Image (cartoon, helix red, strand yellow):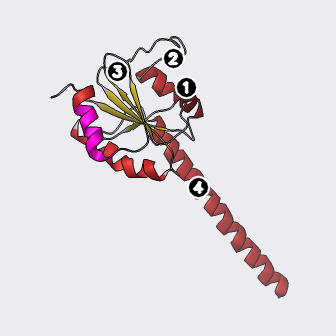
Amino acid sequence: MIRKVFFIGTFILSFVIASCGNSNKANEVKETKSENSSVPEAGKPEYLTYNTFIDKVWDFENSPKEWKYKGKLPAIIDFYADWCGPCKRIAPIMEKIAKEYEGKLVVYKIDTDKQKELASVFQIQSLPSVLFVPVDGQPMMQIGALPEAEYYKVVKEQLLKEN
């Protein structure tokens, strides 16, 4: 009798552990798909990987010393990490900017924990780090979180050249 109870308990425990592991894998697959999606949701930040960065922003492999922005619209690139408190505070600001300026600029996000090579290219050591990329000219890096009004000021004055 004790063996039977022990066996059933072990079986149930194994089933619970196995199902928890599978749900985590399903979340990982879902997360990877959203980062690798070739079609971003309209009015939302787009998550970049190493390859999509090279395709859409700058091919630093072929042009390592010269910045050549590939985009047709100005961009904001938010280097962040899920564990970073200030990154979480500016995330809604980036989403709001992406929505308000849809069709006028692009907001990209790069998870520095998953895209270590990209973080290394830009020598990201502090988070958040936000790169403001005009269509013509050199990008500007801002380290640390700014108040919402400051992000809008940079967008209007530096990226969209509105006065």
- The mark nearer the N terminus, 2 or 4, is 4
Residue at 30% x, 39% y: name it. Answer: 151
Q: Nearer the viewer, mark 4 or mark 1?
A: 1
Structural crowding at the residue carrying mark 3, measured as other residues with C-alpha within 10 Å and reported as few (<14), some (14–19) or many (≥20) = some
Q: Earlier in the sequence, mark 2 or mark 1?
A: 2
Label 2 vs label 1: CA separation? 9 Å
Task: Identify residue for label 2.
Answer: 60
Q: Inspect the image, locate mark 1, and give the three-letter code of the amino acid beneath it.
A: Val
Query: Residue 10: image x %, image y %?
Result: 76, 74
* For marks 2 and 3 on the same chain, the one whose residue lies earlier in the sequence: 2
Q: Which residues are magenta?
A: 146-156
**Element at badge 2?**
loop
Query: Quick one: quadrant of the C terminus?
Result: top left
Query: Which residue is tagged 1?
Result: 121
Report the mark closest to the observer, 2 or 4: 2
Q: Residue at x 38, y 19 (%)?
A: 138
**Alpha carbon of mark 4 to alpha carbon of mark 1: how far?**
30 Å
State the residue position of label 3: 71
Locate residue 17: give its quadrant: bottom right
Numbered disc in front, either 2 or 1 = 1
From the image, tell me which residue sits under label 4: 24
First in sequence: mark 1 vs mark 3: 3
Q: Is residue 118 above or below residue 81?
A: above
Marks 2 and 4 in Cβ contact (< 8 Å): no
Q: Quadrant location of the N terminus?
A: bottom right
**Please, what secondary structure does the residue beneath circle 3 have?**
loop
Q: Residue at x 33, y 43 (%)?
A: 94
Up/down of 92 relative to 100, above or below: below
Q: Is residue 129 magenta?
A: no
